[in-house]
Amino acid sequence: MSLEQLLERLRNDPSFLASVTAWKVLPPREARMSPFPARTDPRLIQALRARGIASLYSHQALAMEEVLAGDNVVLVTPTASGKTLAYNLPVLNQILSDPSSRALYLFPTKALSQDQLAGLYELIGALGEDIKTFTYDGDTSPTARKAIRNAGHIVITNPDMLHTGILPHHTKWIRLFENLRYVVIDELHQYRGIFGSHVGNVLRRLKRIAAFYGSKPQFILTSATIANPRELAATLVEEEVTLIEENGAPAGEKHLILYNPPVVNQQLGIRRSSLLEARRLALEFLKAGVKTITFARSRLFVEVLLTYLREAFPGGPGRRERVRGYRGGYLPLERREIERGLRQGEVLGIVSTNALELGIDVGELQAAIITGYPGSIASVWQQAGRAGRRQGVSAAIVVASSAPLDQFLISHPDYFLGRSPELGLVNPDNLYILANHTKCAAFELPFADGEGLGKKTVDDLLAYFEEQGLLRHTASRWYWSTDSFPAEDISLRSAASENFVIVDTTAEPRVIGEVDRLSAPTLIHEGAIYLHQGEQYQVERLDYENFKAYVRRVAVDYYTDAELAVQIKVIEVFKESRSDLAARFFGDVLVTALPTMYKKVKFHTHENIGAGDIHLPEEQMHTAAYFLSLEPALTGTMTREELEGAVLGLSHLVGNVAPFYLMCDPRDLQSVPQVKGTFTGNPTLYLYDSYPGGIGLSERLFEIDRIIFSSALDLVAGCPCENGCPSCVGPANEVGPGAKGATEKVLRALAEQRLK
């Protein structure tokens, strides 16, 4: 059965349509072509024509013209629109005219780096020129590394390797830094939050070293749909950037279907499992012979879905491997083998985390099943874009879970079809992050008095490091004075520098993973079940002082969920706004978190089957927070139960809806309700950045909170449950039977009241 026939059958299936909240057909789009820019090297034109490329898409030609004119460029077009060629052409054009020129390509993952290398090799092969291109990452052999440093025209790497393997050893990379003309940053939308804030500082260090060797590279950035691409790009590279967003690439017809699993308990508002519905839908496509990718939000869900699909779709003798999994934790060779199987048609179905969200070439996929909202609209479009390339019909189905964020999204289909409402936020000047990279920069090159990392001087930090014995101040310069290697101790993926190492002691001791310090108390306390690659490990001992957790493999039918007692103390208020009904603030807070107990939760049924105490010290963190105080004029007529329900309902709703607009992972922003606030004396809701120093999320929330109140109001008012459920204010047995009405009343007042 063809995909078109299957879609037609689903259109005529009343049981399927009953769960569809939107079915949009995006029409095919014709290509808009442009000639090669006048300054394109004839050898490059000849090589492209030999590959059947007689002209460029309009956005490719415009990007090349802007780059050749000397501008930094950020290109924002959908998946499969030819962004790779848009940056490869100006880079190769420059190297052809000046063979001493060098370029550095940054991709957020090693898998994407390897994939891009293969495509670049093909184009260079067609040129027939000696343009040496290499990947430089953790998998690169020591013998190859020396050759790359000496001869690489194009070096492909990732921010982590640039941070630890290239910048600290710049004296071995003199040829690269002396001749660095271009820095390509792909998948710009991935560089947000903590990761983006770290990468902003890595780029500061890169520019500082390049300037030391006499070069000033241009930046070429590409991104999927994002609300503020020029702002994000300009913040990361700290220079003016030209935005190109008119897409000239063709596209085939795409069906975008938003699917809400049916309600199985009307009173409690509980829906059928999104995982089970994704399994059922994926089987429909696979049995019809449609090449399908199914996305799941966690490694565990990938393994569960993969097991289900293989059981139900064996495909005959020797064909079980036609459905494969793909996620972090697989060995590189295994991932390459899966990618090759997809491209060659040996694999019909694949189940993946967002590891395949990026532009890795996996051949022609026709359908994408997205299990649960993946955290951003950009991710939804990236995952949907994996199905269907430039011709033919494709389909993407978003299967919502019962979470408030999913339910909000599934009932607002216009967010998918219009401009993305999401922002990529970074804060490179976060004190914790800036301080760590200042140490790295001082190790790489001495600082002169008054010199900054970025646009701000760092003299105060340098003086502090001198007091710590890390630096020595001589003749107006600051020199690194210890044997330590600071970059090795700093992870770009978290704010805290210390990570806990997970050691498996089932047989011979071996390291199987790591957990950042802020997450350790709830994930790897003694007695916890640590999940890794679908395997279960029990934490036998947590060595808190030496940052090690010792685990043993077990086979149990439960996982653990820890509880934190969180206290918040306001340190300083930077912004405030008041009305008769509410007061809102943005400022610095001290968050104290004490893990108290953990529950054993049975798989599948989610029933509690036991509990235990956690004996760990409290953790303190200075961060930024948004806090909202409800005045007596709004809450004065409420009973105690209604008041508690309203604050808990607000915390549940706003805490889930806000990340949707802030384009952050829900874990990046934590909400804490206080029925009697310690700062205001009134019912107060705190939402704080989950990282030391803050990364700009709560400050942005202060600016757009009324939009979030309106969206939360739409969600709770449109929820069909009676007294509260997981899809709106939270389960009625946790928030109280009056919570839904009280929360709706408060949200309506907040959405309509103009604050001063």
Image (spheres, helix red, strand yellow):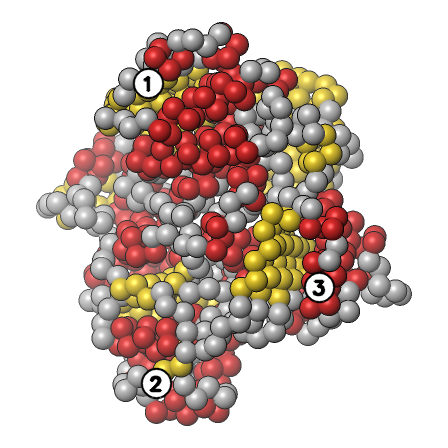
For residue 581, the mark is 1
Picture layout, residue 373 above or below residue 550: below
Q: Amino acid at mark 2?
A: Phe
Is residue 25 shown to the viewer in this render?
yes
At x 73%, y 67%, the residue is: 5
Picture layout, residue 70 above or below residue 552: below
Q: Nearer the viewer, residue 755 or 154?
A: 755
* For marks 3 and 2 on the same chain, the one whose residue lies earlier in the sequence: 3
Measured Cα–Cα span from mark 1 to mark 2: 61 Å
Query: Is the N terminus in the top left, top right, bottom left or bottom right quadrant?
Result: bottom right
Disc 2 crowd rating (10 Å Cα; few below 14, some 14-19, many 20+) is many
Disc 3 crowd rating (10 Å Cα; few below 14, some 14-19, many 20+) is few
Q: Which residue is mark 3?
A: 8
Hey, which quadrant is residue 92 in on the image? bottom left
* For marks 1 and 2 on the same chain, the one whose residue lies earlier in the sequence: 2
Q: Nearer the viewer, residue 79 or 178?
A: 79
| Position of residue 301 measured from the top left corner of the image (x, y, whole percent) | 68, 44
| Position of residue 268 measured from the top left corner of the image (x, y, whole percent) | 67, 26
At x 27%, y 26%, the residue is: 755
Q: In screen coordinates, is 394 left or right of 308?
A: left
| Position of residue 559 measured from the top left corner of the image (x, y, whole percent) | 69, 30
Is residue 164 shown to the viewer in this render?
no
Q: Which residue is mark 2?
A: 36
Circle 1 or circle 2, nearest the eye:
1
| Position of residue 707 measured from the top left corner of the image (x, y, whole percent) | 38, 37
Measured Cα–Cα span from mark 3 to mark 2: 42 Å
Query: Is the C terminus in the top left, top right, bottom left or bottom right quadrant?
Result: top left
Numbered disc 1: secondary structure: loop
